[in-house]
Image (cartoon, helix red, strand yellow):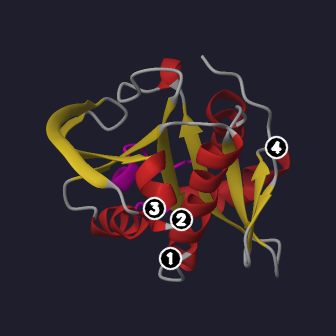
Amino acid sequence: MMQLKQERLTTDRLELRPWCLDYAPALFELARDPHVGPWAGWQPHTSVEESRVVIQQVLAVPDSFAIVERATGALVGAVALKHEDDSYLVRGSDEAELGYWIGVPFQGRGYATEAAAEVLRYAFEDEGIHAVWAGYYDGNERSRRVQEKLGFVHQFSAERDVSLLGEHRIEHCQRLDAEAWHRAG
């Protein structure tokens, strides 16, 4: 797996910060909402302690960021790049997979697009990634629209086992290469 240094990234309205355990209460408040996790393939959180464990075991890794409003300091969601060892879509060390979610109180403000655009800039310009994959489950129109705005191109759709939910779903897999991203920028 490509080991990348952990950065802090900023946009006009957001700061993308490394995860720390201090975010557990705020993460729980967002992740307990049943309108968040299931769209991304995970169960709503049931306690602050569960959110703490998720930070320790899932989120506190390189290229995984807490999305924070710069004006208020409020946690609004998460965005990450997964690399070769952590993604079934990634086909080499020069590719990554983009994932993101925004808490319900902060949806509809363009935060997912803004945060993901900055992570794409970081991937292509700072880390030399050649291509980034992203996927969304059938019916997740918010994620589809974010990926469309960012220039991702549909590659294939497949039925996937969503083990954390005990379901099978259709996932639509898309790709954006560095050359197309630079042309669009």
Quickly name the residue at label 1: 107
Precedes in sequence: disc 1 or disc 3: 1
Q: Amino acid at mark 3?
A: Arg
- Callout 2 amino acid: Ile
Residue at (65% x, 38% y) in the render: 59
Q: Tell me whether circle 1 and circle 4 mark residues in contact (CB < 8 Å).
A: no
Amino acid on which disc 1 is placed: Gln
Dot 3: few (<14), some (14–19), or many (≥20) neighbours within 10 Å? few
Give the image quarter of residue 69. bottom right
Does residue 60 appear left or right of residue 100 in this picture? right
Instruction: Look at the picture and state if 149 lies above or below 136.
Output: below
Tag 2 and tag 1, C-beta contact below 8 Å: yes
Boundaries of the magenta span:
33-48
Q: Is residue 32 visible?
A: no
Expressed as whole percent of the image width and height from the top left, the position of residue 179 reads: 45, 49
Magenta stretch encompasses residue 40: yes
- In this view of the protein, which residue sits in the foreground, 47 or 67? 67
Label number found at residue 183: 3
Residue picked out by circle 4: 20
